Amino acid sequence: MKANEGEFPVSFMCSIFDVSDSGYYAWRKRDKSVVAAKEFELVRKIEQIHLGSRGTYGSPRVLRVLKGMGESCSKPKVERLMKKHGIRAKTKKKFKKTTDSKHNLPVAPNLLERNFSPEKPNQTWASDITYVCTKEGWLFLAVIVDLFSRQIVGWSLDKTMTRELVLAALRQACFRRKPGTGLIFHSDRGSQYCSKEFREQLRQYHMLQSQSRKGDCWDNAVVESFFHTVKTEAIFHEDFETRAQAQAFIFEWIEVFYNRHRLHSTLGYLSPVAFEEKACA
């Protein structure tokens, strides 16, 4: 009857099925209440997922989490409810990249050749440097990404952009992961990565150095993508009073949220840690 209300009068259908008009309308009222209650519960779950993502998840990732919870719903429905209740991903902004490539230091060949999908962990790492603005001054962030799982395996922060910044990230990554011989370490042509000290450290760790072609940011696209994520989903929405405040925030975002909880579309909507654990199980 409900499906045919637009085609036949309700009183006519009630007489055919031997039910009272008042009984049918009472059922319709209860039916709407049930639907409203279910929708309210779904919206509550969407809000919890969005809040748990630090406000960064749009409808595709929210839908993935809902399905992982056993919820049966469609992408259009999630999109509609998020729009209706003003639940949206944080606004993305552009940012610039700083690379000191004007130097006469040796540059390694591009061994990576944009092969961003190694077969196992600790086979290929990629690294780069970006900056964070605080009211105390600049803070520079160097990260090392394992291209297998997109996990941040090493990172460091400093108020100056020197070779020690990238050396600290490298030492941390090696202490954590203890990679074997022959790992490819890829970066841009920044002077920090071309320095004698950094190249010597790579040799001591039995790593092969790889560097991007001149002026080609796509050769290091995975790290560029990570910087885009951390900037647009986290850093751009904060107002850091001090470098120490920024450091604490970045530590928590990388180690607690990004590596362990943030769903990565390239990884089949698993977090980097979950993806690696599943692949190596």
Image (cartoon, rainbow, N blue to C red):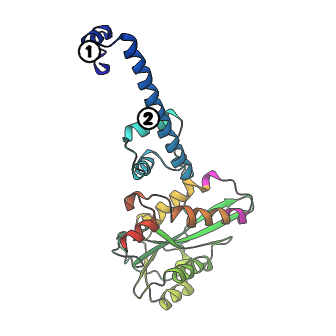
Q: Tell me, yes or no, if residue 103 can be seen here.
A: no
Callout 2: helix, strand or loop?
helix
Q: Where is residue 178 in the image (x, y as percent from the top left)?
A: 48, 84
Q: Position of residue 106 (x, y in %)?
A: 48, 83
Q: How crowded is mark 1: few (under 14 residues within 10 Å), some or many (20 or more)?
A: few
Q: Position of residue 172 (x, y in %)?
A: 57, 79
> On the picture, is 121 further left or further right than 153?
left
- Region rendered in magenta: 236-246
Residue 243 sits inside the magenta stretch: yes
Q: In which quarter of the image is residue 136?
A: bottom right
146 in relation to 14, above or below: below
123 in relation to 70, above or below: below
Q: Quadrant of residue 118?
A: bottom left
Query: Which one is closest to the eye, mark 1 or mark 2?
Result: 1
Q: Tell me, yes or no, if residue 7 can be seen here.
A: yes
Q: Residue furthest left?
A: 16
Pointer 2 residue: 80
Q: In which quarter of the image is the C terminus?
A: bottom left
> On the picture, is 182 further left or further right than 171?
left
166 in relation to 40, above or below: below
Q: Which residue lies furthest to the bottom in this view?
A: 204
| Amino acid type of the residue tagged 2 in the rendering | Arg
Q: Which of these two is toward me, 131 or 216?
A: 131
Callout 1: helix, strand or loop?
loop
| Amino acid type of the residue tagged 1 in the rendering | Phe
The residue that appears at 41% across and 88% down in the rendered structure is: 181
Tell me the tag on residue 17. Answer: 1
The residue that appears at 42% across and 17% down in the rendered structure is: 26
